């Protein structure tokens, strides 16, 4: 789905935000989220990825790290 990604550049591809009870993930498949905006959008209904188990806000990098550690986000390392 993503082109040229690795663990350290995923914030150029993925942006997480909370809308109501949902988490919205904006995706730019070319890694140009900051300059071109999203070319895909994923809505996780009734899911909040923006806060940890203690209710503390998590930024994009923290969310990505959490998903990677839990095996919920897969990245090609080749």
Image: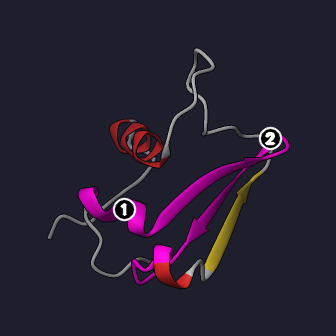
**Which corner quadrant holds the N terminus?**
bottom left
What span is colored magenta in the figure?
7-34
Which residue of the protein is positioned furthest toward the right in this rendering? Answer: 20
Please tell me how crowded label 2 is: few (under 14), some (14-19), or many (20+) other residues with Cα within 10 Å. Answer: few
Residue contact between numbered discs 1 and 2, judged by CB atoms under 8 Å: no
Answer above or below: position of 60 versus 50. below
- What residue is shown with label 1? 10
Identify the residue shown where x is 61% and y is 38%: 50
**Which corner quadrant holds the C terminus?**
bottom left
Q: Is residue 71 left or right of residue 38?
A: left
Image mark for residue 46: 2
Answer above or below: position of 66 versus 27. above
Answer above or below: position of 45 versus 6. above
* Picture mark count: 2
Identify the residue shown where x is 25% and y is 64%: 6
Residue 44 is situated, as x and y percent measured from the top left of the image, at 72, 52
Quadrant hosting residue 3: bottom left
Spatial CA distance of label 1 from label 2 is 24 Å
Q: Is residue 74 left or right of residue 43?
A: left
């Amino acid at each position: 789905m993503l082109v040229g990604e690795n663990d350290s550049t995923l914030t150029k591809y993925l942006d997480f935000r909370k809308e109501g009870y949902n988490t919205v993930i904006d995706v730019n498949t070319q890694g140009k989220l900051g300059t071109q905006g999203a070319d895909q959008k994923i809505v996780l209904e009734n899911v909040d990825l923006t806060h940890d188990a203690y209710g503390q806000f998590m930024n994009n990098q923290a969310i990505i790290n959490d998903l990677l550690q839990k095996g919920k986000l897969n990245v090609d390392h080749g």
